[in-house]
Amino acid sequence: MSTTTPGAGTGVNGAHPDVAQRSFGELIGDVTQDLSTLVRQEMDLAKAELRQEAGKAGRAAGAFGAAGVAGHMVLLFLSFALWWALANGMDEGWAALIVAVVWAVAAAVLFAVARAQARRVRGLTRTAETAKQIPNALKPEPGGYR
């Protein structure tokens, strides 16, 4: 429901007719309403794009999960095959222990790599640096807002 005066409003191709006969307040009101509509439409577009991209990301995450399960099964059966091959030349218990030690070494190496990468994570350092640059007048008071 519009509160503009007769003759006010959007004409053909989005132009406002009779601009010279309208008050400054009416013109500002139209600009505000148009800006509000534009922002609302942009927000709706952004939401639609985010929904679409989130769906794609969800499908990709599902595919990565399935690939991880399949990779785990490959490693499991390769471990069984190695155990079985080693058991042809030695006791089965020793063959299983050798396979377990190989996996323990692999786990230790992967853990060391992960720990080194985790230590490189710095967090929100850029955000903290830019927050320090905000003028004191724009920062909230230590006791909060009064």
Image: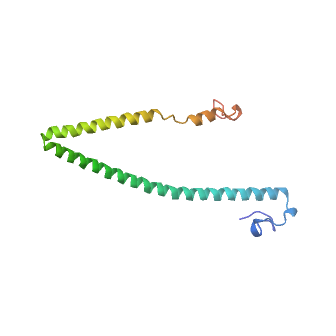
Q: Is residue 146 visible?
A: no
The structure residue drawn at horizontal position 59% and vertical position 34%, both measured from the top left corner, is 128
Q: Residue 108: image x %, image y %?
A: 32, 34
The structure residue drawn at horizontal position 59% and vertical position 56%, both measured from the top left corner, is 46
Q: Residue 113: image x %, image y %?
A: 39, 35
Kindly indicate the quadrant of the structure image that contains residue 62. Answer: bottom left
Q: In the drawing, does residue 80 fall left or right of residue 38?
A: left
Extreme-top residue of the structure = 142
Extreme-bottom residue of the structure = 12
Q: Residue 26: image x %, image y %?
A: 81, 59
Kindly indicate the quadrant of the structure image that contains residue 21. Answer: bottom right
Q: In the drawing, does residue 99 fall left or right of residue 33?
A: left
| Colour pattern | rainbow
Q: Is residue 27 visible?
A: yes
Location of the N terminus by quadrant is bottom right
Q: Is residue 94 above or below residue 30?
A: above
Kindly indicate the quadrant of the structure image that contains residue 126. Answer: top right
Give the camera-side residue of 113 and 66.
113
